Image (cartoon, helix red, strand yellow):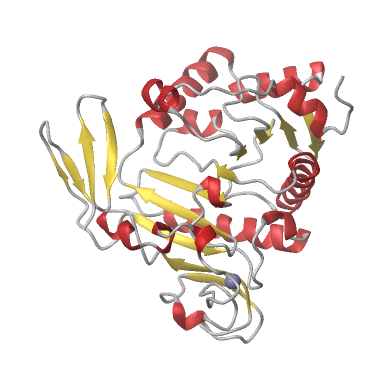
Amino acid sequence: MSEIRYDSLHDTHVLIAPERLHRPDMIPIQMINQEESVCPFCEGNELMTPKEIYAIRILDSLANGVGWKTRVVPNLYKAVAIEAPHSYHHGNFGYWDGFGAHEVIIDTSMHKTSMMQWDQQERCDWLKTLRQRVGDLRRDQRISYLSLFKNEGFDAGSTMAHCHTQLIGLPLIPKEIHLMNRYAVDYYKEHHHALIESIISYEEESLVRMVETHGAFSAFCPYASSYPFEVMISSKYHVGQIDTLNESDLDDLATLLGSVLLRLKSELNSFSFNLSISTPPLGEDISLYEAHRLRIRIMPRLYRLGGFEMSSHMMINPVLPELAAKLLRGEEYD
Ligand SMILES: [Zn+2]
């Protein structure tokens, strides 16, 4: 069983998860002949995965059979388990028993290997699935934080070629997230609006880092982007969180996401990336909920991390965000 160990020297936590050792990605994905091996995420191979937790299904189709658009299953190589005791052991060598949720969202029933291949309906179904899962898991009072992310491509640490998303629910709030939340609340209390509202207002006026806007959402290259060609999609106004998005905003978000991915593809061709979707702050803190905005962060992995990044927790980005935005808008490099 895994443990979430407290690192008292760095005041942070580490997930020690021996089950992950058996993942297929311990063999580099490039060495696996994807054409010859049977893909457990493809429609027709439902019995190769654990039983589904949720699926968007075609009318009258049966659970764990064919006839679905998205499908959610427990991660076979889970980092944390919902059956583990929800208990913390105190001390300098403190740890949580490996309690938590670890789900895999199979994004499409067809064997698509890139988000760039999705159509608008697939993007909408994907967002609706995330909406349902986050809404469901946030009702579990034992979970304090949800991490929602995708890895696409070898350099992003992808484990399976077939498009999928992961959702990990933890009994604690990671230190970096906690600090970010606290800063967001302090800003909100002082200025009576969310920090991201000020940022997007500035970006929309100055235009230098803007990529595109659609509906309530804006896509821009963040001023202090950690990754080259990093793009953030966020709502300036409070349109709700991923679990409370209405149909019209969900459709707008899917449209903008599709357009941003196409822009990235036309600039970078085939590339690995990590994508994270912000999840609602859990618990009762209303100011934090108000200060928080739905964000999708796309982080292209064009360079490998080195010793400086690992030791200082500070990133080196060789591409000016202003230049990345200009190129993504389709303007010439001068
Ligand atoms: Zn597949």
54 on left or right of 111: left
Which residue sits at x=69%, y=30%?
A: 236
Where 235 sits versus 25, above or below?
Answer: above
The residue furthest front is 31
Which residue sits at x=33%, y=50%?
A: 141
Quadrant holding the C terminus: top right
> Which one is in front, 270 or 224?
270
The percent position of residue 233, horizontal first and vertical second, equals: 68, 37
Dividing the picture into quarters, in which one does residue 1 lie?
Answer: bottom left
> Which one is in front, 235 or 255?
255
The percent position of residue 314, horizontal first and vertical second, equals: 46, 21
Where 59 sits versus 32, above or below?
Answer: below
Where 247 sits versus 273, above or below?
Answer: below
Dividing the picture into quarters, in which one does residue 174 lie?
Answer: top left
290 on left or right of 28: right
76 on left or right of 334: left
Where 317 sits versus 121, above or below?
Answer: above
Which residue sits at x=58%, y=44%?
A: 275
The percent position of residue 289, horizontal first and vertical second, equals: 51, 34
